[in-house]
Amino acid sequence: MKTRYGIALDIGTSGIRAQALDIENGKVISTAITLRHPLPGANVVDHLHFAIKVGRDTAHNILIDSVNKVIKSLNIDLKNVERVAVCGNPIQLSLFHNIEIRDLAYWGPHALERLHVTPPSRNAIIVNAREIWLKINQEAEIYIPPAIKHEIGADALAMLFKSEVLEKKGIYLVSDFGTNAEIALVIDGEVYSCSAAAGPAVEGQMIEKGRLASPGTICDLEIGDYGWKTRILDEDLIAQEGDTVDPSGGKIISSAESSVNPIGITGTGVIAAYSLGLDTGIISLPKIKSPDNKINLHKEIYLTEKDIENIGKALGAFRAAHLTLAEESGVFLDEIDATYMAGASGFYVDPHKSLNVGQIPPSSREIYQMGNTSLSMAKDIILDPGLLEKLQEIADGMRSKHITLATSPTFEKIYSLELAMCEQGMPFWMYNDWLTKYGFQKIPPKVSNPVIHKIFERDIPELGEYGLKITKIGSVLEAEFEGCTNCMTCALNCPENALTIENGLATVRTDRCSGMGCLRCELGCPQKAFKYEKLLTLKEKYETSKKLKYAI
Amino acid sequence: MSYNEELEPKIDQDFVAVRYNVELEGPAITPENDPDVQAILPKDEPYRSIARAVLRGDTEESTIKVKEGLNSGIPPMDIINNGLMKGMDAVNELYTKGFYFLPDLMLSGDSMMEGLKESEEALGHKSETKGTVVSFVAEGDPHDIGKNLVVMFLRANGYNAIDLGRDVPNEDVVNAVREYKPLFMTGTALMTTTMTAFPKVVEELEKNGLEVPAIGCGGGAVRKDFIESFPMSVYGVKAYHTPKLADSILKDKKTWKEIRKKYSKIVGEFVPEYD
């Protein structure tokens, strides 16, 4: 008898993850991921912006093209795929489903009225492979889980569902850490949620030497005998011991056995450096106290004072968000019974450092590192499609209040304290004094021995017999520019090495390109010949991919 | 050991020791004992009490003192110029020196504004200011912390800041320029989807034959090269630079082109973005 397959999919801002499952016995067969998102941009707003500019259909096609590549590298007979379940934030799921996205791109009534946008339903839905153009058995059912509310997506539902805090008595803090962090404070089943635009800094972006998690990046640091011991991701994205470095001067104190030169620092590494920097005093906000005003982590890898400011602002958004949620719901942060961290960076980060720098409250006594809950919920749906309806019921019945931090006066007051700390060097005790002055609770004391529950070795617990495959995205945009003198300024300006240009013909790798938030290619062109818009006009491949039916 | 005690050693003590409200050794130094503040604070009552209330960010006290002054027949303009503004000058002094922080400034700004409201009510009209500045957050963008800081810094420095709020349609911005003929304008955005409003605002202004000496644009996602890709605009790096940019237009008749060239000089500090 042939094997019946299911595919669980997680579409995240920093990449696509997929797993093939045997429907009969629930066994994981294989896993494939991409290290970037196929659409240009460093965050989900950039993805949105790109999608609006290029047109929703084309953005959808680029995304699906990548999903198809990932699925193909799962190494299963795609004719026998019967179920696909997908999870992600509302923007990614809307791009996947190819429904309205503009309601997620603008806040407030004005832009949406002007554009005549009606927000679509984002309830649970089953479509078939043909509608999405997935290159699998065309009759396969595709399960798309519901958003809880306009602002809270299926990714937040996944972290709440998998942490099982909705049915429990007690106070729980659940966060999914990504470029955008979904944070929920759950009090006896009642959910207070917010979304913190912590920014790409905590994913290693917007940091001069920062990188998304990939082989060769520094992912953690420990204080060693005479310096900081680096930990570096290997080809399988497992942390390996690296050299020990003097952060002040950058000298390598001792080399690791299999010494490699790191290519950058990833989000968890950034948090580690910030935590160690504060502990050792090399960071004295807003300054770095070293001869070159940098924290040196290897020969060419360092953090600047500007980086430190960006990290401070990003982590400050977490701390201010926790306080805002606690104040709005009327609990104290040290009353929280357990803290749940979802997402890859929430899994790989050292929780001691997280609570040292404010990524989670310093009073977190019980910490659960859950891994990728979106993928995990998608797997649950594959094995029990009836769950989809149950998730809709949970979403409908959820007693929840969403707090938009951007418009919360409480958040504004607290975030200004964060700005005073990381931009002006206001001491921390003053921060607490100000909280008292405002009538808010203080930041609770730090627990010394938090209990950390980390059940798996990886954020995706089981990779399957075929292991992990990293899929190359490889989609490109092309355009020819009149008046180009081949001066190469655009290619040299490109911070992501996404662009090549030859005789006026520019080729841009969509997965690397930072997109609408960057545009350094266009803005730096001395001839004013480079027009990013032109890259968007047409890429035959994506326009026609709808017509190129995948016949099995 | 508490969290505070743990963090204390991480703070640069040399720096902290000279700060105010710090009881390290001996009695704490109060803000009004600073010699520069002493020089700014008025000697006569009720101005001194009003200025001190503003300096402390004590809104209740500043309102009471302003009301008392007005009731005793002191002209509202004198209350504003000799009391409230002097208090704000002292706040600015401490902020520039690094002894006061953002929250101090916000609190003092509030007490100044409350006193100003009382005085203007007695006056029967808006008081005279250095000039009018219009501030807005781009359409579709809710993030207004940056704009609120800009407005606060402008008011603290004697400007009439018209706050158009968040999610402001381009035509409302154009109408505000027509109505107020501002000396300077500021636009902020945190999202890349919304910062595209800035060149459109400039285009609309040009179409309507309107001109502002300069439009300072800034915010999370906004970069200098983007802002300089269209006319009339200046990339603003820090919120506290805003009054200095306005001063340069008011006093030295600087245009947006000149501000782009002399930014560091105008704000009086080295600004890496303009290096």
Image (cartoon, rainbow, N blue to C red):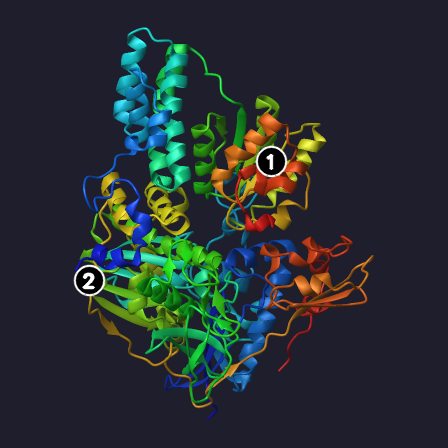
Q: State left or right for residue B80 relative to residue A537.
A: left
Q: Secondary structure at mark 2?
A: loop
Which residue occupies 28% across, 7% down?
B72
Residue A205 x/y as whole percent: 50, 63
Comparing B228 with A261, the one in front is A261
Element carrying mark 1:
strand
Classify A470 as above or below B218.
Answer: below
* Image mark for residue B215: 1
Real-space Cα distance between discs 1 and 2?
50 Å
Pointer 1 local density, CA inside 10 Å: few below 14, some 14–19, many at least 20: many
Chain of the residue where label 1 is placed in the rendered structure: B
Q: Chain of mark 2?
A: A
User: Mark 2: which amino acid?
Assistant: Asp
Q: Position of residue B42 (x, y in %)?
A: 34, 20
Judge from the rendering whether residue A260 lies leftward or rightward of residue B183; answer left or right: left
Q: Amino acid at mark 1?
A: Ile
Against A270, is B39 above or below?
above
Q: How many marks?
A: 2
- In the foreground, A97 or A276: A276
Q: Residues within 10 Å of mark 2 (few under 14, many from 20)?
A: some
Can residue B1 be seen in the rendering of this structure?
A: yes
Residue A196 % position (x, y): 40, 54
Q: Does B92 sit left or right of B64 as displayed?
A: right
